[in-house]
Amino acid sequence: MPIQKAQKQRKSGRAGKIEDVAAATGVSIMTVSRAMRGVEGVSESKRAEILKAAKRLSYVPNSNARSLAVAHSDLIGISLPTFLDDVFADILEGMRSALDNAGFETVIDTTGYCERREEAWVDRMLAWHPAGVILGGVHHSPAVSASLKSARIPTLQTWDYTPDPIDICVGIDHFAAGGLAGSQLLERGYRRPGIVGVTRGRDLRAEARFAGFRDAFASAGVTDIPESRIDKHASFEAGMLGAQALLEQSRPVPDVLFFLSDHMAFGGLSACEAQDLRTPEDIGIMGFNGLGINTVLRRPLATIVSPRKQMGHLGARNLLARIHGVRTERHVALPVEFQPGGTLRSLPGESPVHD
Amino acid sequence: MTRPAKPPTMADVAKAAGVSPMTVSRAFKRDASVSEPTRRTILETAERLGYIFDSMAAGLSSRRTGFVAVTIPSINNANFADTVRGLVENLRGTGLQILLGYTDYDMHEEERLVEQFLTRRPEAMVLTGGKHTPRCRHLLEKAGIPIIETWDLPADPIDQVVGFSNADAGRMMVRHFVERGCSRLGFIGGDTTRDTRGLDRRRGFVDGLNEAGLDATRLVAAGLPPVSMREGAQALRDLIERWPDTEAVMCVSDLSAFGALTECLRMGIAVPDRLAVAGFGAYEVSELSVPSITTIDVHAERIGAETAACILGRLDDAAAPGIPEPLVPRLLLRQSTGGVGN
């Protein structure tokens, strides 16, 4: 096989083998194995000597072999639909201390919103016998759910919410969050909203928010809501192009735009400014998430803040409970919060946000 | 979920399908010695029982695991995301899967991750940066697989490198500022040893100042990496408070530059007339910001694409190619330093 040939030719040589460690310390292979696995039958001083030799010789126990013998592992697999925004970074940051303190390592795959890739990833993870699995979102192929259920791996679904998780879930209800956005805009007198998102079906959380948003407006008799869908990785540019399209094509011109994220909203705000539309006088802008950009803008975006770090923290805590066989809440929907910012008409008694 | 009964084993599948465990294993490995109807029966039985074929156990004999391990410092950094995208897109269809570990800019965490990955026998390993703990370096040297260091230009590479000189990027910005007639120059960030590439950019910036005979003390700390927009804004305030006559500032990344720029607007400091502001990394926000931000493009996605080409070349052909040419960072002139552009 080519790779093995390549290995032989590398000047850096091969990984140390268990036999090398045994020879260097004058013990049997079985004793090295026992020492590495931390099981009984090796004195503490001998164990220290063996571990030192293993380090020196770059011997790494092959966990492929090891995982056949022991059921537990210190690995947690994480599958994210994307990491092109701050959302999952914040969730993982919220998880980090809990997982680190408990001695777990994490490996991540980004599935690019592709079910087949997630299936392949789950197959690999299960072969590695992880202590737990974390999935971004709650929409998975039946094969993924079935595999995880039958392997009985503690599994946390996060960012989205379902009352019927594979195992446990800590997230937010995106339909309700979109509904909150809609009702806040209605209260401020907006009646001609437009929606700016990405290609339909790529971000299922956003689709749920848009559905909740439409639902809120429908209850006030507004049913004709134009949408602009942009197929771009770059979120600022997508927001700008989406806003441009709605401003040019929708008649009457929308009085407020609801964006998939704050970054898209910032792009949309630039598009409005480029057309000499004043915000909030001529058009309202609303984002989603409460991202870092909102901490430096002179006029912060109106947005719905998602509790991402808290979600990560609670999710990790509950997953660790599951790994240790402790009962925990099966599903938790965390509350979101509306922030008026400075890009919407204010309500009577509400002071507009400027610096 | 109550505590598990044991997951089904290969022996369970063999029994239910009326074949030997060896035949089950062969069926999963698509061994030609198993007839198609038998294979189908076995796979259906396995599916029904919820049995997962342990490809790692199979990997023990064949030594192919089909994955490439990648370490990145941070997952919300659009630059590294672009590199990973370049890598993923260029490995598509090759059967190689990417698994990521993030180090949080911590060399010891990198060491732990590398060890974790190596126990699972990746086909190749990609690292962000060229500085590692001695033990991590030793493990990598002994791993016997292609090792590719990226985003850096280490003097003593472990194996292959796809990167650029961060110090040159800092020096490049000094030249640009001097050409614009600025002589009192500051730098925001790059102050912690955690982000060694940011530190290198600042070092190059300071070297450039010294070479030009300029004051090289206007360096402002911005906190632990990744430096946020808000920290960039705070650092700009600190800079102006200490050295009010500063004429130009480079920030360790475009995110901090955007924060610094918004702070200038808030403080009534005209950009670029009174203070020129530049960033690094060609993040999207630098292009859309008003004024747009001068930055340095390091071809993040191309780093990923070239890394993929390196890996494929090495796995296909034992005669490994030499170290590819370093990428050359490119200065993007924009409004925030009085350059052209939108």
Image (cartoon, rainbow, N blue to C red):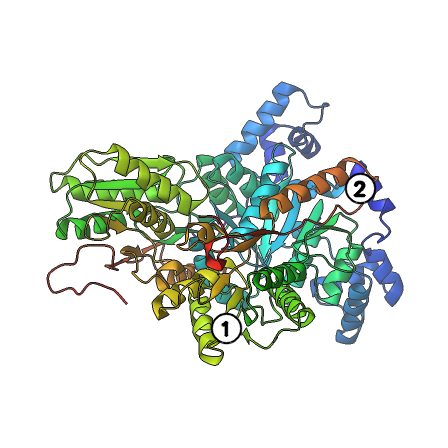
Q: Quadrant of the N terminus of chain A?
A: top right
Q: State the residue at coordinates (80%, 71%).
A: A49
Residue A82 in the figure: left or right of residue A278? right
Residue B206 location, quadrant: bottom right
Which residue does the numbered mark 2 point to in the structure image? Answer: B321
State the mark number for residue A55.
none
Which residue does the numbered mark 1 point to in the structure image? Answer: B246
Is residue B256 shown to the viewer in this render?
A: yes
Q: Chain of mark 2?
A: B
| x and y percentages locating residue B171 in the rendered image | 65, 62
Q: State the residue at coordinates (59%, 45%).
A: B301
Q: Quadrant of the C terminus of chain A?
A: bottom left
Q: Secondary structure at mark 1?
A: loop
Q: Secondary structure at mark 2?
A: loop
Residue B275 in the figure: left or right of residue B172? left
Which tag, 2 or 1, sits closer to the chain's start?
A: 1
Residue type, label 1: Thr
Residue type, label 2: Pro
Nearest the eye: B129 or A95: B129
| x and y percentages locating residue A351 in the rendered image | 17, 65
Nearest the eye: B77 or B254: B254
Instruction: Name, please, the residue furthest toward the bottom.
Output: B242
Q: Mark 2 or 1, which is nearer the eye? A: 1
| x and y percentages locating residue A266 in the rendered image | 35, 51
Is residue A125 shown to the viewer in this render?
A: no
How crowded pointer 2 is (Cα within 10 Å; few <14, some 14-19, many 20+) is rated as few
